């Protein structure tokens, strides 16, 4: 396993910054609303840049904005340097969210060496859909999201699950064509996005218990500029509400033993 720290980690972050700049460039040109997300948003607020030990970067958009972004990338993306990866552009890709990849690099997460999709350095692009307001339907929606997430993860789980029974179960799930699950995501999104709801979520992301159904839709109404590594990116105007729901007391640094990077088996920048 390669330990991501020091010069290697900083080089990785700077490569990810290139992709953030490209996403921001396209979004500004085509008036597409986005925000930094997850640890990247937290890093922007708390550190004015990457969290010092963070090895990935995230942005988030509502479904309608991502559809515009995907269309714009067909002719606007600098394809000499970058690749927009999702189920329509990589027939081996099984994650429920999109990635921007940096051409000419390698980034293999430990346990995913057998996965055949493009495995270069990336940033995650999360797409959010509405969550039903009705309590019972909301619970069914949560269960559906769980099933889709586990089914798409089965390509990894069939080799890396913690016990042989789970590995067998993932092998069974893995026999279901991946396009079935992406079609299910698309159909579910079409239904839930017909009108505005209280909550939104990414359908294949496991949230903590306090926000397991989703995050406030109102956070996606207004945006502001925020410095990040010397550049200006978009973040939610109500970032405090968003980060509090997502992390709780997000301004308090975690103990040192919790400041971990993902295990990586190969990296070339």
Image (cartoon, helix red, strand yellow):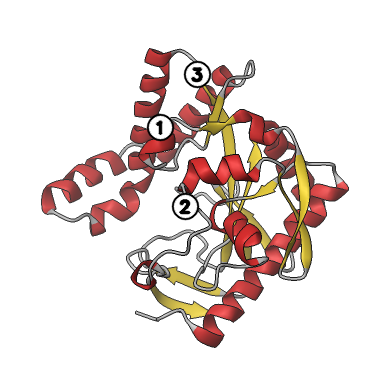
Write down the quadrant of residue 112 in the picture: bottom left
Q: Residue at x 46, y 46 (%)?
A: 248
Residue 177 location (% of width, % of height): 38, 38
Residue 89 location (% of width, % of height): 60, 49
> Where 31 sits versus 193, above or below?
below
- Earlier along the polypeptide chain: callout 3 or callout 2? 2
> Where 163 sits versus 218, above or below?
below
Name the residue at the right extreme.
29
Distance from Cα at disc 3 to Cα at disc 1: 12 Å
* Number of the front mark, 1 or 2: 1
Give the side of residue 1 with respect to residue 58, left or right.
left
| Disc 2 element | loop
Residue in the foreground of this view, choosing between 255 and 150: 255
Distance from Cα at disc 1 to Cα at disc 2: 21 Å
Residue under circle 2? 92
Placement of the C terminus among the 4 image quadrants: bottom right
Q: Residue at x 53, y 83 (%)?
A: 8
Name the residue at the bottom extreme.
7
Residue 172 location (% of width, % of height): 23, 40
Residue 159 location (% of width, % of height): 24, 58
| Disc 1 element | helix
* Number of the front mark, 3 or 2: 3
Which mark is drawn over residue 145? 1
Residue under circle 3? 132
- Earlier along the polypeptide chain: callout 1 or callout 2? 2
Q: Residues within 10 Å of mark 2 (few under 14, many from 20)?
A: some
Distance from Cα at disc 3 to Cα at disc 2: 31 Å
Q: Residues within 10 Å of mark 3 (few under 14, many from 20)?
A: many
Placement of the N terminus among the 4 image quadrants: bottom left
């Amino acid at each position: 396993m390669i330990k991501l720290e020091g010069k290697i980690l900083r080089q990785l972050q700077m490569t990810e910054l290139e992709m953030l700049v490209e996403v921001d460039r396209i979004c500004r040109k085509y008036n597409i609303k986005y925000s930094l997300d997850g640890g990247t948003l937290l890093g922007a607020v708390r550190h004015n840049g990457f969290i010092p030990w963070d090895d990935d970067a995230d942005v988030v958009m509502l479904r309608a904005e991502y559809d515009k972004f995907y269309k714009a990338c067909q002719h606007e993306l600098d394809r000499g340097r970058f690749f927009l990866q999702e189920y329509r552009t990589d027939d081996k890709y099984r994650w429920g969210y999109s990635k921007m990849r940096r051409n000419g690099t390698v980034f293999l997460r430990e346990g995913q060496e057998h996965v055949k999709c493009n495995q270069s350095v990336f940033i995650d692009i999360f797409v959010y859909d509405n969550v039903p307001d009705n309590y019972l339907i909301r619970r069914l929606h949560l269960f559906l999201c769980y099933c889709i997430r586990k089914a798409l993860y089965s390509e990894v789980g069939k080799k890396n699950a913690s016990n042989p029974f789970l590995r067998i179960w993932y092998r069974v799930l893995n026999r279901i064509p991946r396009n079935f699950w992406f079609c299910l995501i698309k159909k579910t999104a079409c239904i839930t996005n017909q009108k505005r709801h209280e909550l939104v979520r990414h359908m294949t992301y496991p949230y903590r218990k306090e926000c397991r159904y989703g995050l406030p839709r109102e956070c996606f109404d207004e945006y502001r500029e925020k410095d990040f590594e010397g550049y200006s990116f978009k973040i939610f105007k109500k970032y405090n509400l968003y980060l509090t729901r997502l992390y709780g007391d997000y301004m308090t640094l975690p103990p040192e033993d919790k400041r971990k990077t993902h295990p990586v088996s190969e990296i070339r920048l």
